[in-house]
Image (tube, rainbow, N blue to C red):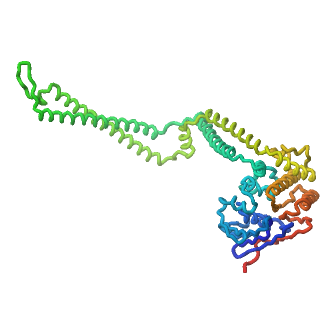
Amino acid sequence: MRIKEIHVIEGLFERKIEFINQANLIFSLENSCGKTTLVRLILYSLGYQIPNTKNIKFENCSVRCLLELDNGGIVRLHRPNCFSISVEGEDKAFALPEQLDELHEILFGTSNKDILHNILGAFYFDQEKGWTLLNRGVVIGSLRFNIEELVRGISGLDCSELIARERQVNSNLSKYKQMYSIAQYRDSVQQDLLIADTYEEKTDVEIQQLLMEKSNLQREISRVGKSIIGNKKFEEFIDEMKLLVSTEDGQQITVTKDNIVGFNDSVDYLIAKKKILLQELSDVLKKIEKITSQQTNEKNQLAFFKSESLAEVFDKQIVKLPLNQIAIKRAMDELEKERKQLKHEISKISRSDNTVVMSLYKTVVAYATELGVGNSESVTAKYLFTSNLKELSGAVLHKLVFAFKLGYINEIENHLGIKLPIILDSPRGKEVDEKNISLMIGILKRDFKENQIIIASIYEYDFDEMKKIEIKDRLINELRG
């Protein structure tokens, strides 16, 4: 893939810049003139979510980019608020960032997400992150690079289920860590603070108890009332039935409410009980009213004084949470153990294709040796996946990163059958002298002469054919006609 031109419009100003297929130098005599902005605009035009620079907000610009693909196809990219491309005259629209993978399938000729998600970290060297990004980490903004993902993509290995499980475990572990921190704080509050219930809290408890008592009394009153009504209906029933009973001497007596033994006493008892219950209910209601009135007075009085701080309210609420440090820690340990097992399994699968790993290793060792920062003894195949960068710094790290990334580019190109652009933002670090720069440029001229090279720098470099794009004061400085 080669970038042919980029056209940027910002308000009343615009600038169109053309690139050649060989080396291109974005140059200015001083920093902060727009070199990095132009580089980022190129990446922005390719669909990436790129952070703005100090002076230009990319979303306020109209950016058009013309690309030539390795199959000879011409692609026109246009990125205002939405994103559209034209492939051989056919227009297509993409919603970014949701459809970024679909767009990059067209540009890079692969649908493998492990490659697509890591391809930028291979060919782009950011001035802030790029020269310290060895095998995993931030490329720019929120875009990341991971060597194991890239190797899996090139090897055609699938760890999607393991990765999904690892993601879920990491999410759960994060939650448990937060719970554990809260549990620790909660326990410290319980140990160090004596948090007394306020008057309002105590009276709230009393009111709740009285409300329960009120509810019980109301239910009992309702039950007794129903019994009284039932007895009265029974009286009426007896009178209506005109029942007769025979005595021992043969007399027949009509049954009425008055000659049923104990009937009136039972009714009188129920009526008396209801009266007692109603009195008890009245007493409870008076108590509730009294406490509510006292609470209101208390609030009115406390209104003249300082209220509880947010921290005090938080402490009183957090001690009520049923959090067990021991149980949470046990769950964390289990999740941590599972995460380590998953990472080990993913790493094992990622490195299982010895053909890709050894090819990458040989390329890195060759370039590291040429640059004077390693050989087959110091840079082993296992070292490709190292996480220990503490011993690396300055020019050594700078050149080793260069060797690693050239290895990535080589493997991607061999796998996809394409040529990637190589974009270097400020390749000359503080501790990288002219000799080391010459070595790096020499490798590019010799082994990557078919790749388009774009360098942003205040220094000039020796290429056989190079276009110099000079920025004198501001990147976008031409008034639109």
Position of 150 relative to 172 (above/below): below
Q: Position of residue 140 (x, y in %)?
A: 75, 57
Position of 140 relative to 180 (above/below): below
- Judge by depth and name the residue closer to the eye, 269 or 438: 438
- Judge by depth and name the residue closer to the eye, 43 or 353: 353
Decide if residue 32 is in sight here.
no
Q: Position of residue 456 (x, y in %)?
A: 83, 64
- Residue visible at 82% across and 52% down? 132
User: What is the quadrant of the N terminus in the image?
Assistant: bottom right
Residue 439 vs residue 19: left or right? right
User: What is the quadrant of the C terminus in the image?
Assistant: bottom right
Q: Which residue reaches farthest bottom?
A: 481
How many marks the image carries: the answer is 0
- Residue visible at 55% across and 36% down? 322
Position of 431 relative to 172 (above/below): below
Residue 337 vs residue 357: left or right? left
Q: Which residue reaches farthest top?
A: 248
Position of 273 relative to 370 (above/below): above
- Residue visible at 14% across and 32% down? 238
Q: Position of residue 96 (x, y in %)?
A: 66, 62
- Judge by depth and name the residue closer to the eye, 412 or 252: 412
Decide if residue 226 is in sight here.
yes
- Judge by depth and name the residue closer to the eye, 353 or 41: 353
Q: Position of residue 18 (x, y in %)?
A: 80, 72
Residue 243 vs residue 395: left or right? left
